[in-house]
Amino acid sequence: MNLDIVVAHDRNIYMMLRIVNSYMNAVKRIPVTEGVWEELSVLKRAGQTYNELLSDLIEEHKKALLFKEMHAIEERADFIELE
């Protein structure tokens, strides 16, 4: 393989990674009402960022959905006993 091609290929990968990295680290604004902002502020721990708070809330929500689905499966008795 030609060294020029390798360097160009590496440069292209680097540029693609920079573009993806820039996009992933972009700051997004989420409009919320005053009431929601106040409730978020109450939930936020000292030293915790709003990004961390929202991430924690998302994880808690996912877990709650999982437990809700597990409970629904148990209620329907929709399972097979293993021998």
Image (spheres, helix red, strand yellow):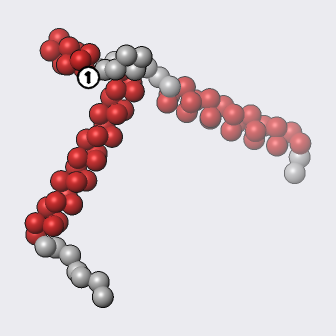
The quadrant where residue 28 appears: top left
Relative vertical location of residue 75 with respect to residue 38 in this rendering, above or below: below
Q: Residue furthest left?
A: 75
Task: Measuring from the top left, give residue 17's x and y in whole percent.
Answer: 62, 34
Q: Identify the residue position indicated by label 1 in the image.
A: 43
Q: Crowdedness of circle 1 by 10 Å Cα count: few (<14), some, many (20+)?
A: some
Residue 55 is at least partly visible in this image: yes
The quadrant where residue 71 appears: bottom left
**Which residue is pictured at 13% across the width and 73% down the height?**
77
Q: Residue furthest bottom?
A: 83
Residue 31 is at least partly visible in this image: no
* Relative horizontal placement of residue 50, taking residue 33 as reference (left or right): right
**Which residue is pictured at 49% across the width and 30% down the height?**
24
The quadrant where residue 80 appears: bottom left
Task: Measuring from the top left, give residue 44's x and y in whole percent.
Answer: 31, 20
Relative vertical location of residue 70 with respect to residue 28 in this rendering, above or below: below
Where the C terminus falls, by quadrant? Answer: bottom left
> What element does badge 1 sit on?
helix
- Count of numbered labels shown in the rendering: 1
* Relative horizontal placement of residue 7, taking residue 46 as reference (left or right): right
Three-letter code, disc 1: Leu
Relative vertical location of residue 54 with respect to residue 36 in this rendering, above or below: below
**Which residue is pictured at 14% across the width and 61% down the height?**
72
Q: Residue furthest top?
A: 34
* Relative horizontal placement of residue 4, taking residue 29 as reference (left or right): right
* Relative horizontal placement of residue 53, taking residue 64 as reference (left or right): right
**Which residue is pictured at 89% across the width and 46% down the height?**
2
Relative vertical location of residue 3 with respect to residue 19 in this rendering, above or below: below
